[in-house]
Image (cartoon, grey):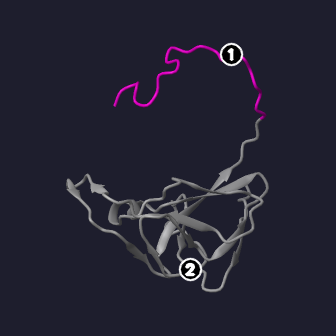
Amino acid sequence: MEKPIVKIKLLPGGKMPEKKSSGAAAWDCFAREDVIVREAPVLVGLGFMAEPPEGYYLEIVPRSSTGLKTPLRQPNSVGIIDADYRGEVKAMYEVPVGLRDFSIGVQISVREFVIQSGDRIAQMVLRKMEEADLVQVDELSETERGAKGFGSTGK
């Protein structure tokens, strides 16, 4: 089976995304510039533009160590890079005020975090696009769960 090809165009100062192990599901992406991240979300340029193959799109997510070892949070959870987007791929980060470190039970008072050019700051995942048609209806089928949500099924 032939692997899909994602075309990458590097921008000045950009680095090619890379997988650090043979079993890695995502490519590490690097900051192209120095950025100071504070409470308001900022975009961090990753130094490349991408063209996924037909029928695919890309997701930009934080690296696991970003969530564990820094106060950075990605406010949109996942960045979607549509197949027809041809601008610089970027990650969005913020440093929430009053962030609590649950692993040690203390309040973190960090107000800013500096991302330096070349830092591995995000991961990129290739995803297959699923096509579907939306159909408006008057009723949906009933289920045992119904409209119960937001933790209604337990911890």
Segment tinted magenta in the rendering: 133-155
Q: Residue 138: name its quadrant.
A: top right
- Rounded to the nearest angstrom, the CA distance separating label 2 from label 1 is 50 Å
Is residue 27 at all visible to an observer of this figure? Answer: no
Q: Is residue 149 magenta?
A: yes
Q: Residue furthest bottom?
A: 12
Q: Residue at x 55, y 15 (%)?
A: 143
Query: On residue 139, which mark appears?
Result: 1
Q: Residue at x 69, y 49 (%)?
A: 128
Q: Secondary structure at mark 2?
A: loop
Residue 121 as seen in the image, left or right of residue 154: right
Query: On residue 95, which mark appears?
Result: none
Q: How many marks?
A: 2
Query: On residue 32, which mark appears?
Result: 2
Q: Nearer the viewer, residue 138 or 89?
A: 138
Residue 19 as seen in the image, left or right of residue 36: right
Query: What secondary structure do most residues of the magenta stretch adopt?
Result: loop
